[in-house]
């Protein structure tokens, strides 16, 4: 596990964007696993800036996102498809058909989960998976206390996750109660993992994920077992970990 410390959120975003850029430059047809939430926004904005300077070419890149809310259409401003379109896809030269998210509107969600797993297999697996971490240790929407060996599945969102995500909606009632998420199994099969973490409010969960026991009660703790993990975190997020 490599830990890269950045001074602040902007520094974390640039350092992480450098790692994603290196992947795109070295392997232009990479499959990149993408995350949503507020943490990766700076990474996406930096990538767009470098694309505009002609430093990056996304034309052969394929992307698979970790998750999507159940019941939100791609046009809904809080859907992850909308987020990705707004914050990355529309501003770079990636063909839309190379961008993939679970379909939150699928009525037959079991079939949709199978389709998504098959899609990842057909793409040849994920070369680099970008991750954020929830305050309860979730990655994607893999909430605490679920089996580690799950593939894409539908989850009932935890109260803490609903509360954390209420800030993006008009009120708590509007936050979807379900989501489709890539499972821990697919995340662990990614060839490389890049976890981005910012802020003092994530310091304790980051400590537990990195140094605590590997347990489904902290889903992110499983990445301790992954052979190629890079964590880029700012000083505040690393506040409970001694790097010496
Ligand atoms: C959501 C997403 C996760 C993300 C988490 C943390 O629940 N499904 O993929 O890592 O939020 O979000 P933030 O970065 O806003 O703290």
Image (tube, grey):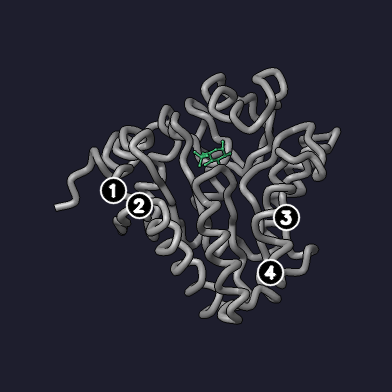
Q: Quadrant of residue 168?
A: top right
Relative placement, left or right, of 6 versus 182 is: left
Locate the N terminus and report the quarter of the image it occupies. bottom left
Residue that numbered label 1 is attached to: 235
Q: What SS does tag 3 mark?
A: helix
Residue topped by disc 2: 8
Horizontal arrangement in the rendering, residue 71 relative to residue 135 (left or right): right
Identify the residue at image location x=74%, y=40%: 77
Camera-near label (3 vs 2) is 2
Percent across and percent down for residue 115 are 77, 48
Q: How far apart are marks 4 and 3 (CA)?
A: 10 Å
Q: Is mark 3 within 8 Å of ligand 1?
A: no
Which of the two labelled residues, at mark 3 and mark 2, occupies the earlier sequence position? 2
**How far apart in space, not on screen, are marks 1 and 3 (Cα)?**
30 Å
Residue appearing at x 68%, y 69% in the figure:
92
Q: Earlier in the sequence, mark 2 or mark 1?
A: 2
Q: Earlier in the sequence, mark 4 or mark 3?
A: 3
Which residue matches tag 4?
A: 92
The answer to whether mark 2 and mark 1 are in CB contact below 8 A is: yes
Q: Give whichever of discs 1 and 4 has the lower sequence position.
A: 4
Q: Nearer the viewer, residue 62 or 9?
A: 9
Q: Do the residues labelled 1 and 4 touch (CB within 8 Å)?
A: no
- Marks 2, 4: nearer the viewer: 2
Report helix, strand or loop for mark 2: loop
Label 2 to label 1, Cα distance in Å?
A: 6 Å
Residue that badge 3 annotates: 85
Picture coordinates of residue 234, whole percent (x, y): 33, 50
Q: How far apart are marks 1 and 4 (CA)?
A: 30 Å
Check the image and report above or below for 30 versus 55: above
Looking at marks 1 and 3 on the same chain, the residue that comes earlier in the sequence is marked by 3
Classify residue 150 by image quadrant.
Answer: top right
């Amino acid at each position: 596990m490599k830990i890269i410390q950045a001074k602040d959120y902007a520094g974390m975003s640039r350092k992480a964007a450098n790692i994603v850029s290196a992947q795109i430059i070295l392997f232009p047809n990479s499959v990149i696993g993408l995350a949503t939430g507020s943490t990766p926004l700076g990474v996406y904005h930096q990538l767009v800036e470098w694309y505009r300077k002609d430093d990056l070419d996304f034309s052969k890149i394929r992307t698979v996102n970790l998750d999507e809310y159940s019941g939100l259409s791609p046009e809904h401003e809080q859907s992850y498809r909308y987020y990705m379109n707004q914050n990355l896809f529309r501003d770079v030269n990636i063909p839309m058909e190379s961008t993939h998210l679970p379909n939150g509107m699928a009525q037959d969600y079991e079939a949709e989960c199978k389709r998504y797993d098959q899609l990842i297999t057909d793409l040849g697996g994920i070369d680099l998976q970008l991750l954020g971490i929830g305050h309860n240790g979730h990655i994607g929407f893999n909430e605490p206390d679920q089996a580690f060996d799950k593939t894409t599945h539908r989850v009932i969102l935890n109260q803490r996750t609903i509360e954390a995500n209420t800030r993006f909606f008009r009120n708590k009632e509007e936050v979807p109660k379900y989501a489709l998420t890539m499972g821990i199994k697919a995340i662990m099969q990614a060839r490389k993992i890049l976890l981005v973490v910012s802020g003092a409010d994530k310091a304790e969960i980051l400590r537990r994920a990195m140094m605590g026991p590997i347990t489904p009660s902290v889903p992110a703790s499983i990445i301790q077992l992954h052979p190629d993990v890079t964590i880029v975190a700012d000083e505040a997020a690393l506040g409970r970990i001694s790097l010496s």
